[in-house]
Image (cartoon, rainbow, N blue to C red):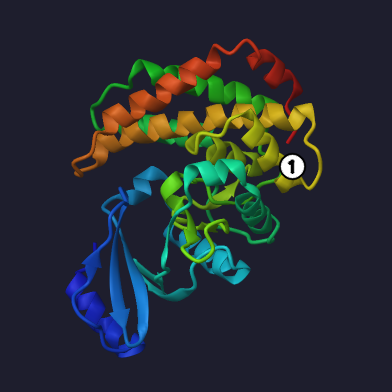
Amino acid sequence: MADLGELVQRLERVLGPAGGEPVALEGGITNHNFRVRFGDRECVLRLPGKDTGLLGIDREAELLAAQEAARLGIAPPLVASGAGYLVTEYLQAGPIDPARLRAAPESAALALRAFHDSGLQLPARFWVPDLLDQYARIVHEKGRTLPDGFAQARALTGQIAAALPLRDPAPCHDDLLPSNVLARHREPGRALLVDWEYAGMGHRMFDLGNLAVNNGFDEPAEERLLEAYLGETPRAGHRAALALMRIMSDAREGAWGVVQSAVSELEFDFDGYARHHFSRLSHAARDPRLQEWLDGATA
C-alpha cells in the first residue's frame, strides 16, 4: 500500500491543500478508504490492500468501470487516479436500507442495466468457474487444504455454466454486497453502486443473482428486480437463471473466503465467511427445483 502521508502531499499539488488528517472509513476487506478534504472538495481516497491481484482483481478494470459508472450517474464522480490509488467525491450517503431495496429494487436494476448496456470493454474477465480454479491453485500453493464445500461449489458452478454459458460477456460489477449499494441521504431510494474492484466482462445475470442473494431478496422482490431490469414481465427461464446465479454467487463468496484465509493478514473470520456461503449454497442445491432451473434457464 502506498504511503498515505506521501500520497496526500502529492495529491495536494493537484487537488488543493488537504484540510486536516485523513480519516479512515469503516468497511473494506481488500482495500483501505480514507475521507480527505482537498481544497473545497470532500473526497474518498482509496488504496488497494496487499496481494489483491490473487483474488482476481484488475485495477485497470476497476478504474475504467468507476469512470464509466460515474459518467452514467450511478456512482460517485471520479476526482483523480494513479498507480495504487483512486480518489472519488465523498457523498453524504450510506447503504440503502435492505427492506427499502427489497421493496423497490427498480433503481438498482436500472443502474445495472445501464452499465451492462454501456458498451464498455474491460480488460478483465469475471467468470466464477475460472475463479474457483484459480483460487484452488492458490490455496494448494499455500500448503492449505480445500474444505469440503469447495468441491460441491465447483461441481454446481460447472452445471450452471453449462446451462448459462458466458456467450455474450457484458461489463459487470460482480460484488453487490449491501455495503456497495448506496443512496444519498436526500435521495434514499436512488441506488448508487460503489467498489468496482471486481468489475469485469461477465454474465449480466450474475449481477442480478449476486444482488438478490446478498441483500436477502424473496421471490416477490426478485420478480420486481427482473421486471425492472428486463422492462417486461419475466419468463420462467429468467426466474430460473436468477435462482442459479444466486447459487453461483455463493460459490464465489465461499471460495473467496477460502483463498482469503490462506493469503490475507487481516483479522477477519474468513473461514466462517466461507462456511456461511457454502452452507447456503448447499441448502439451495437441495431445492427440488434445481434440475428444473438447469433445464429451463434463459439468459
Q: Which residue bears the numbered disc 1?
A: 227
| Residue 183 image offset from top left, x and y in percent | 50, 59
Q: Is residue 279 above or below residue 21?
A: above
| Residue 24 image offset from top left, x and y in percent | 23, 63
Res 127 seen here: no
Q: State left or right for residue 213 relative to residue 8.
A: right
Give the total of numbered labels. 1
Q: Residue at x 62, y 46 (%)?
A: 104
Q: Residue at x 51, y 52 (%)?
A: 199
Quarter of the image that includes the C terminus: top right
Q: Secondary structure at mark 1?
A: helix
Q: State left or right for residue 204 relative to residue 30.
A: right
Q: State left or right for residue 124 relative to residue 8.
A: right
| Residue 135 image offset from top left, x and y in percent | 39, 34
| Residue 145 image offset from top left, x and y in percent | 28, 21
Q: Residue at x 47, y 37 (%)?
A: 131
Q: Is residue 191 above or below residue 99?
A: below
User: Which amino acid type is shown beneath numbered disc 1?
Assistant: Glu
Q: Quadrant of residue 276?
A: top left
Q: Is residue 70 above or below residue 233?
A: below
Res 275 seen here: yes
Between residue 86 and residue 155, name the one nearer to us: 86
